[in-house]
Image (cartoon, helix red, strand yellow):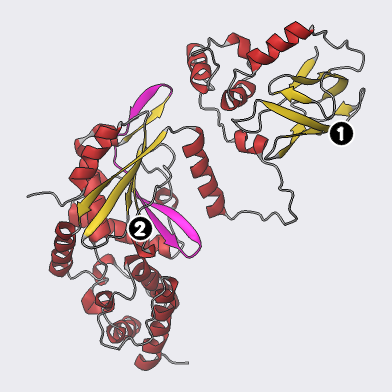
Amino acid sequence: MALTKESIEAEIKAKVVEIAAQTGDDASELELDDIIPATGLIDSTGLLELIAWYEKHYEIALAQEEINIDNLGTLTRMAEFVLRKKS
Amino acid sequence: MATPIYVPRINNNDDEVKVLAFDVGVGDKLQSGQIVGQIETDKAVLDVTAPSEGYVLGFVAKAEEVVKVGSVMLWLGESKDEAVPEIQDAAAGQSASKVSQVTAKARILLEQNGLQAELIPQVDGRVTVEAVERYLATKGGAKVEAKLSAVSQVLDVLPEVEGNQVNLTREEKGMAATVAWHRDFAVPGYIEIDYDLAPWAEYAKRFQDEKGLLMPPLLPLMAWRLVELARETQRLNATFVGNKRFEYAPVNLGFTIQAGESLYLAVVRQSQALDEFGFVNSLGDVLRRAAGHNLRESEASGATIAFSSMERWKVKRHIPILSPHTSLMVAHAAGQDGRGVLGASYDHRVLNGGQVVAALKKLSSPKKS
């Protein structure tokens, strides 16, 4: 199945919800444009887990300088970044 | 020559144990490691095993008898026909008393080096690991680094309650080895200070905004401060080997990270050669690989100093286990009402409390530029 922005956003959100649940937080109301680190729903270790999953799941290798708010700060930005890397 | 099998120590508080039963008889041929019988204290039952192969010559202890730790339980011989050495009651008592002054760890080190306790000059009337190491050092010290983890093998017994033994994963084995070093070698202490969270929080926020970082850099920045302190104070970046302090040349910063069920100590080697931003990026790379269970070999070992946080679990304080061959592991935890607790486990052979407090005070706020 072809990746779409919407399907990627949904997959990433599901992963964020899963990670947040590890520390007892509910991320089900996370919006597409919420700055994920600023929500406090997942901490730095959770973010690391999210990024590690993101690289593996979408088969993209990230350089450290690419791991920033502009590229990966929100669900939408993460989805768009996958599509850019794949294009 | 006849070889004694001594009554082993089950725990430090029991100088006497009860012999439950023998599983072998006089004349039996035993293999090394074969179970010869069981002893018990109030807390545990332990299988006693043969240290080498041989024939059972005779028993000194009896089933159901309470005996002294370190006394002779039975004798093994190279042939069935060897005579059982005669032990006079008084002499036996003296022997037991003498042997019981050998610590459990020292006994294992003696066994690993094929030494008799009588050869070792005592320290304060006891044969300790330190005394054995000193003796070995005078003989060239070739075997000084003999591992003491066998202690756990000697003392491990299956519980009475029914259950299953499960093989450990590679990571679990690594963690077991790490905590065994803390127990067997380090002389651990723990100290903590209270500190104001605001200066670090403000500094980290500013740093994150300036660099456009996705990851909150607070903990990497604190770890970097620890690297700086290790550069300034060599003693913080050291360990203890063979009665000497071993001062490391590089600062290899270990950082604990929980990835799923695995706990890693991810290592940034040669941290002292980096600058602040370079370190934050390097640590980010290493931690990301740890989170994906893809740590490289060089990133999973070799820490010379370490940093641990349990903030994500909302833990207010924790006492970390020292990683092998480190003398300082800083413990970061969740704050409350603007205040936090910054602690450290340390090896008292290398550092004293005052030195650790001085380091923690410096670590409790960003470096003043």
Magenta stretch containing residue B244, yes or no?
yes
- The answer to whether residue B328 is seen in the rendering is yes
Stretch of the chain drawn in magenta: B242-267
Image quadrant occupied by the N terminus of chain B = top right
Separation of disc 1 and disc 2 at Cα? 53 Å
- The answer to whether residue A61 is seen in the rendering is no
**Which residue occupies 70% across, 35% down?**
B41
Residue B62, position as x, y percentages in the image: 84, 24
**Looking at the rendered structure, which numbered label has been put on residue B66?**
none
**Which residue occupies 25% across, 34% down?**
B355
A77, A86: nearer the viewer: A77
Looking at the rendered structure, the kind of residue marked 1 is Asp
Up the image or down, B363 lies above or below B11; here it is below
B353, B200: nearer the viewer: B353
Marked residue chain, label 1 = B
**Which residue occupies 12% across, 67% down?**
B210
Q: Which residue is mark 2?
A: B286
Of pointers 1 and 2, the one earlier in the residue sequence: 1
Up the image or down, B216 lies above or below B358; here it is below
Residue B334, position as x, y percentages in the image: 31, 60
Q: Which residue is mark 1?
A: B23
